[in-house]
Image: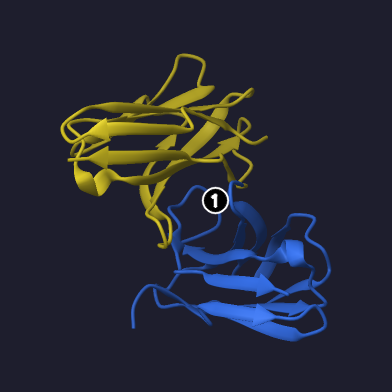
């Protein structure tokens, strides 16, 4: 079940905040977030597991909504280095399917 | 060398050719993956190997044939490809199969003419 990411693209000025959503029609077991810069490989950001509500690393945090069918990635006080395409990968099912399905990505551009 | 490496980085092949993509991980991981990334499409999981055994095969056409001789190396053998197979092929590895962070290689940009 491919997750749906929104928005498809967002343009920010340095220092602004952004939210990227990742939605599924099923309750999620885990959500993985990756960032891919143009011409580079995806790089892992964070994993949020079913039992968790939120995780945070510096100015990036992720959370689940109440039904665990949506995860949101929050970027605070964005920096130029945050530019890239953000992918969420989801794993559904009560016990996890161990199969990660990625969304189409959200392209984030941070301008000076 | 560290991390996940892939060779070649670029490959142009005709539809009748046979070629292989190579992936090597230096992280001591037990699981390795092949993904296909096309323009404007999500990352598509093709194959997963855990401890050298194939555990996932996502309805990939038989013209793609994976091989995992040991936990550090993964190959993708290609033959009689189609132009629509042109894409970036990414290899990744993780500590184990499941909800572990994956480390991606730089990819092989494949063009089928």
Q: Residue at x 27, y 32 (%)?
A: A12
Quarter of the view holding residue B61? bottom right
Quarter of the view holding residue A92? top right
> Would you place residue A6 above or below residue B22 in this image?
above
Which chain is yellow in the rendering? Answer: A
The residue closer to the viewer here, A52 or B39, is B39
Which chain is blue in the rendering? Answer: B
Q: Residue at x 43, y 53 (%)?
A: B101
Residue A83 image offset from top left, x and y in percent: 31, 45
Q: Residue at x 21, y 30 (%)?
A: A76
> Would you place residue A66 above or below residue B109 in this image?
above
The residue closer to the viewer here, A30 or A71, is A71
- Which element is circle 1 on? loop
* Residue B10 as seen in the image, left or right of residue A110: right
* Residue B89 as seen in the image, left or right of residue B9: right
Q: Residues within 10 Å of mark 1 (few under 14, many from 20)?
A: some
């Amino acid at each position: 079940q491919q997750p749906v990411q929104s928005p498809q693209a967002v343009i920010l000025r340095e220092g602004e905040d952004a939210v990227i959503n990742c939605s599924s029609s099923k309750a999620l077991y885990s959500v993985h977030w990756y960032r891919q810069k143009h011409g580079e490989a995806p790089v892992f950001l964070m994993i949020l597991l079913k039992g968790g509500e939120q995780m945070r690393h510096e100015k990036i945090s992720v959370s689940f909504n109440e039904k665990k069918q949506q995860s949101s990635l929050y970027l605070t006080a964005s920096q130029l280095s945050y530019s890239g395409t953000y992918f969420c990968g989801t794993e559904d099912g009560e016990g996890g399917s161990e199969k990660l399905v990625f969304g189409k990505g959200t392209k984030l551009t941070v301008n000076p | 060398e560290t991390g996940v490496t892939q060779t070649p980085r670029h490959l142009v092949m005709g539809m009748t050719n046979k070629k292989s993509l190579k992936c090597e991980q230096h992280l001591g991981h037990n699981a390795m993956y092949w993904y296909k990334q096309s323009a404007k499409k999500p990352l598509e999981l093709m194959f997963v190997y855990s401890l050298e055994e194939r555990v996932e095969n996502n309805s990939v056409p038989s013209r793609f044939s994976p091989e995992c001789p040991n936990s550090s190396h993964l190959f993708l053998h290609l033959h009689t490809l189609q132009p629509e197979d042109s894409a970036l092929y990414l290899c990744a590895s993780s500590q184990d199969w499941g909800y572990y962070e994956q480390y991606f290689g730089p990819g092989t940009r494949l063009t089928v003419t």
